Amino acid sequence: MPDPGVGFEFPTFPVTWLKRDLLLFAASIGCTADELHFLYELHPSFSAFPTYPVILPFKHTDQEVIDFYARSSSTPIAGVPKFDTKGVLDGERKIEFLKPIPVTSEGKSFEIRSKVLGVYDKGKPGTVVETQQELVERGSGTVYTRATGSAFYVGQGGWGGPKGPKTVNYPPPANKPADATHTIQTTTETALLYRLNGDYNPLHATPEPGMKMGFGGPIIHGLFSWNAAAHAVLQKIGGSDPANMKEFQARFASPVKPGDKIVVEMWRMGNLDDCGFEEVRFIVRVDGGKVCLSNGRALVKSQGAAKSKL
């Protein structure tokens, strides 16, 4: 008999995006003026930053702000308790890039297909819900990206569910300096800009939710740090070419607060697959403080510095 919740399929929903959405996303995660192919819609190589699809399950088809809590709590998972989304944090995210998305969804029809991979009871600390989300073109059934992720519902465990499997870890090499580093200086406005992509969780805008969860105030989206780290890896190792990233993943280890400086440290592992993609491991830490993203792993083709001039 399958574990509770496993295989549960959420209702599919349409998603859309415009060139403007891609420009906002690229700007909000730190793309720079020498990467105009992400920041200027008339650039001959204008492209979506590869991790953009992670925002679509939040955005849907909206161009206006939405009620984050109402949307995220709309579909309870059959066979498990109903969890309070006001106490949820990202656990881990991985995305596989199967086909580059077009720079606008206009003229095509896309949807998100989601299902539950596991619901794990961690006792007093909380419950982990692991899901898979695919960006699919309707009609053809073509899958553009496949993302797996876990959400941690703080303090909502102890309901008698399975504990879940042991996680696979990808630590950086011991006693070896990083092959590349990248520094990101956040500001008190970083999360207020990033949320305009469609992730309107009040935890990242107003102090009250963060006070209740013990953070002392607002925190920056975990997916900001995750996407900013993806930008760092692609820029430093993949020459800012979106075709040079095949997979990207990281685990959310601790919160980042507005104004923190975060540092991405990257290690090239030297193992190439048949298509020339190399494993890169990375960690992201708050400068002078805790690791905020661990278990970082990407498959990247190495290339020189970014070239994006007209």
Image (cartoon, rainbow, N blue to C red):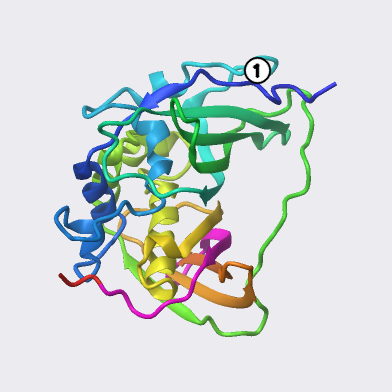
Question: For this rendering, which residue is in front, 5 or 289?
Answer: 5
- Magenta stretch bounds: 286-307
- The residue most toward the front is 140
Give the labeled residue for mark 1.
81
Closer to us: 175 or 96? 96
- In the picture shown, does residue 199 fall above or below 247? above
Can residue 32 be seen at all in this image of the molecule?
yes
Choose top left, top right, bottom left or bottom right for residue 139: top left
Whether residue 295 appears in magenta in the rendering, the answer is yes
Q: Quadrant of residue 170?
A: bottom right
Q: Position of residue 154 (x, y in %)?
A: 58, 34
Please state which amino acid type lies under the numbered disc 1.
Pro
Residue 126 in percent (x, y) is at 65, 34
Q: Is residue 298 a member of the stretch shown in magenta? A: yes
The quarter of the image holding the C terminus is bottom left
* Residue 217: image location, x then y, percent: 36, 43
